[in-house]
Amino acid sequence: MTTSHAVVIGSGIGGLTAAVALYQRGWQVTVLERAVSLEPVGAGIALAPNAQRALDVIGLGDEIRSLAAWQGDGGMRTPDGRWVSRMSAEAARERFGGPIVMLHRATLVDRIASRLPEGVIRTGAPAAVAEPGVAGGRRAVVSTPDGDLEADLVVGADGINSAVRGVLFPSHPGPSYTGLTAWRVLIAAEDAPEQPFEPHETWGRGALWGTQPLKDGRIYAYAAAAAPVGDHAPDGEQAELLRRFGDWHDPIPAIIAAAAGGPVLRNDIHHMATPLPAFHRGRTALVGDAAHAMAPTLGQGGNQAIEDAIVLAHHAPPGGDLGAGLATYSAERLPRTSAIVRKAAQVARLQAVDSRPGVAIRTALMSAVSRLGPGVVLRTFDGIADWRPPQQPYASGTRDRART
């Protein structure tokens, strides 16, 4: 009897989750990572209940829930500090069956990778798909500097500029620029502002700022603004943040000042405005940004990658009908993720409003909606945060509810 072999290209959140899920289903798994270490790009990630339930399937959900930093309320503010809307953590938990968990990406990567046996992850190992294979026929072939690997299944988890995607769908236009660039900073606990504050997003003219506390005392902050693609500040990105956000409400100036002690990451935001025709070809499947890169405005990029991984493993049992399984994977994931990509793009356009009249109208509408109650605000995430995996075990939530 031969063991079914899966090769995962890329060791980001989606790739590692796929590797663990496939391994637990009985696959022999090899993860190939171009970088020399598992040091994810980025700072923080928000895991919504949908991703937590997906992680339940591989035994990680409760471990991640234990890292939730904030149990109170937060909301949206204007640059002068006025609250436009409030978000109730308890209402979100009641509606979707769990809290939002904000944590460092490195923490999440470490927790997922710890579920794999020694030697499965190979760093410093660039790889390319030489042959995507034929489901029910010839195996896929992955080229590496150390020679070719044959695989019964290849998972392309190589990010927004995916080379695997280019092999499977060479005529697809790929990701396009949203018009927004993003900054991310992580403030050490000893450098964090002393005064307590609630998690918030602050929306201004064509720009936003978000501040989120982590459980270990660090602060994750992010910002976005309209900017030409490829633009960078000649005097450094901290100086750029100071110019754009230095006169916004507390604790934003103090966080920018504290960012002097560490890197300020800046990345243009791209998304897959044109959906792929499928998320697989032959014996090769795509997960995460390689399949459906989206604007971060709904906080669902990493969450959807985790969902992808769990659904893919569910429909790809070792020795099963891989062709039918991958077709079902595409059929389930393509419509869902395409809808979320579109919704995230709509929110990005709303955030990018920069005329004074437009901002005033946006603020008034959000304030009016907030006064109708937390259920109306949370309805934005109906169909997203309430998703459940196609298999048990997972947390079922506090109660069944009828949407209002």
Image: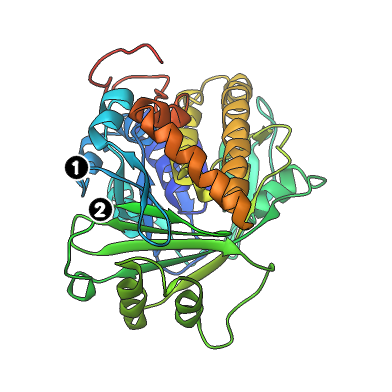
The amino acid type, in three-letter code, at marker 2 is Glu
- The residue closer to the viewer here, 165 or 247, is 247
Count of marks overlaid on the render? 2
Kindly tell me whether residue 225 is visible in this rendering. Answer: yes
Q: Quadrant of residue 21?
A: top left
The residue located at (32%, 35%) in the rendering is 52
Quarter of the image containing the N terminus? top left
Residue 368 x %, y %: 44, 34
Question: Which residue is situated farthest in the right direction here?
Answer: 171
- The residue closer to the viewer here, 127 or 289, is 289
- Compared with residue 43, is residue 69 higher up or lower down, i.e. above or below? above
Question: Relative to 62, is 27 on the left or the right?
Answer: right
Residue 154 x %, y %: 57, 41
The residue located at (46%, 51%) in the rendering is 31
Residue indicated by mark 1:
71
The amino acid type, in three-letter code, at marker 1 is Gln
Q: Choose mark 1 or mark 2, whichever is in front.
A: 2
Earlier sequence position, callout 1 versus callout 2: 1
Residue 109 x %, y %: 35, 53
Label of residue 198 in the image: 2
Question: Relative to 189, is 135 on the left or the right?
Answer: right
Residue 166 x %, y %: 73, 50
The residue located at (18%, 42%) in the rendering is 66
